Image (spheres, rainbow, N blue to C red):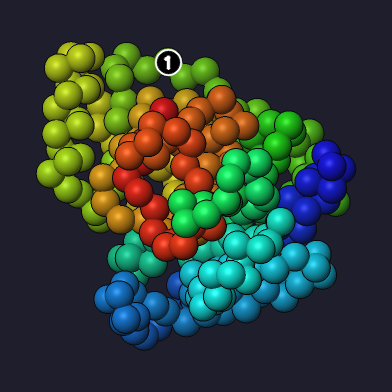
Amino acid sequence: MAQQLQTLIGTAIDAAFDAGRCILEVYGRGFVVQEKADRSPLTEADLKAHAAIAECLAGTGLPMLSEEGRDVPIQERQGWDMYWLVDPLDGTKEFVKRNGEFTVNIALMGRDGLPGGPLGTSVPLGGVLYAPVTDLLYFAWEGGGAWRQGSAATKPGSGAYERTLMSTRLPVEHAREAYTVVASRSHASPETEAFIERMRSLHGDITLTTMGSALKIAIVAEGLADVYPRYAPTMEWDTAAGHAIAMEAGREVLDLTTNTRLRYNKNELVNPWFIVQ
């Protein structure tokens, strides 16, 4: 199983790089922003990245559930033992703003051994987060650790394990003077503000960092922040890859309604409120 996970995550890294090249090609020129039914933005980059990832992952023989290919019947997807959960461009609002804080998210999912049903069937077995603008890669697989690699697409690598030899294992010791909270740049909420005030009352002066996309989960996994509270809507493909990286770095992603690990492949693909710590 360990060798299989390594191989699959290696393929996911290649897929993320392919998607990143598609995204940067669109990012470097003018583009049209459309609006989806849920009023979230959609660009040519989202669609091109989805197509590149689907083509690369097709050879694995595993089904794929993607933000841009979400219309899979519940009965079918909840019957999957392993599958890919993908956000081809996480942080489209940041992409449109051209601030660089967007990622390609690819997670490998498997059954979590708990009773299945409307509240979920699965947990991340591995994940890849890739930030194309900075060429920064985070990746992990179950039992293999969590890793960060800079200048990632320019470095040769024939698989996930080989990349670990050129990467930094997470978490990393960082000299921080204050308790650090990371929060969404684009999705503030009264509940988030209340959480920040609670942390301030517990820890005194705190540092507040805001950013877009799943990078927020990655910086908690890395050790640059202590906690990421999310009191606003997200979808399963927004969190799964980062969740895998956080778990392998010794962090937890907790469903705030149950105080247990966030589950996936629910009847509704919207996540509950959660906290990464």
Q: Residue at x 17, y 48 (%)?
A: 189
Q: Quadrant of residue 105?
A: bottom right
Q: Is residue 118 above or below residue 73?
A: above
Q: Please, what is the three-letter code of the amino acid marked with disc 1?
A: Ala
Report whether 129 appears left or right of 52: left
Q: Is residue 268 above or below residue 187?
A: below
Pick the residue in front: 187 or 99: 187
Visible residue check, residue 130 = no
Q: Is residue 246 above or below residue 86?
A: above
Q: Residue at x 52, y 54 (%)?
A: 117
Q: Residue at x 60, y 62 (%)?
A: 78
Q: Residue at x 51, y 73 (%)?
A: 70
Element type at marker 1? loop
Residue 88 percent across, percent down from the top left: 54, 67
Report whether 198 appears left or right of 118: left
The quadrant of the picture occupied by the N terminus is top right
Residue 227 percent across, percent down from the top left: 36, 30
Q: Which residue is mark 1?
A: 175
Pick the residue in front: 269 or 147: 269
Residue 170 percent across, percent down from the top left: 60, 28
Question: Which class describes the residues within 10 Å of circle 1: few (<14), some (14-19), or many (20+)?
Answer: few
Pick the residue in front: 143 or 120: 120
Pick the residue in front: 89 or 192: 192
